[in-house]
Image (spheres, rainbow, N blue to C red):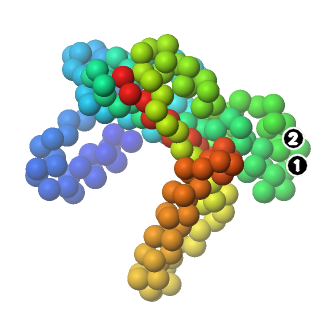
Amino acid sequence: MLAAAQRRLAAEPADVRDRVRLVRGSGEDAPALTRGRRFAAVLCHGVLMYLSEPAPMIEALCACTVVDGIVSVMALNAATLAVRPALERRWDDARAAFHARGECGVLGLDTRADTVEELSGLFADRGVRPLAWYGVWLFTDWMTLDDGDDGDDEDDEDELTRIAEVELEAGRRDPYRRLSRVFHLVGRG
């Protein structure tokens, strides 16, 4: 992931590259790795699901946030683990997923799922007030999207725009956001 970030950063203009510093280390060690520096916004997207326990990472994120700063996490939704196996007609796996707290993820690694309520509690215990949460990947995660290589980039871009509009609207309202594969929780310190 760090190598991918380095490649992407290298492609950015100098004014962007000059504002970014990549640091190798565990997220739970972020306060020490950043020498106690605090930030206006701290993001942890798509990482919690690979950790055995979310509390140490949430603690580190909150410790790196300035007073009145934003903490943003995206986590696997424990309430929807049965959907993917059901859509794939893996009925035994779907039935078992109703009682599961994790699954083998798309990278082939075991993942752990969270709930909005649990992570909101971890935020609150560390002085971060949950502000809002959103569903992510309601429709697109459950389907295979064509790679769009039909030679018509304008049509592909138009479809991506329409997909993003529908996903954004679904992610903001119930019951749709509750059915999303992943949720995005935002809090203020």
Residue under numbered circle 1: 91
Q: Secondary structure at mark 2?
A: helix
Q: Marks 2/1: CA distance?
A: 6 Å
Which labelled disc corresponds to residue 179? none
159 is higher (above) or lower (below) than 171: below
Contact (CB < 8 A) between labels 2 and 1? yes
163 is higher (above) or lower (below) than 114: below
Residue at x 59%, y 68% (from the top left corner): 145
> Residue 95: horizontal and vertical position, in percent?
87, 41
- The amino acid marked with disc number 2 is Arg
Q: Is residue 76 visible?
A: yes
Residue at x 19%, y 40% (from the top left corner): 20
Q: Residues within 10 Å of mark 2 (few under 14, many from 20)?
A: some
160 is higher (above) or lower (below) than 63: below
Looking at the figure, which quarter contains the N terminus? top left
> Residue 54: horizontal and vertical position, in percent?
53, 22
Q: Is residue 106 visible?
A: no
Residue under numbered circle 2: 95
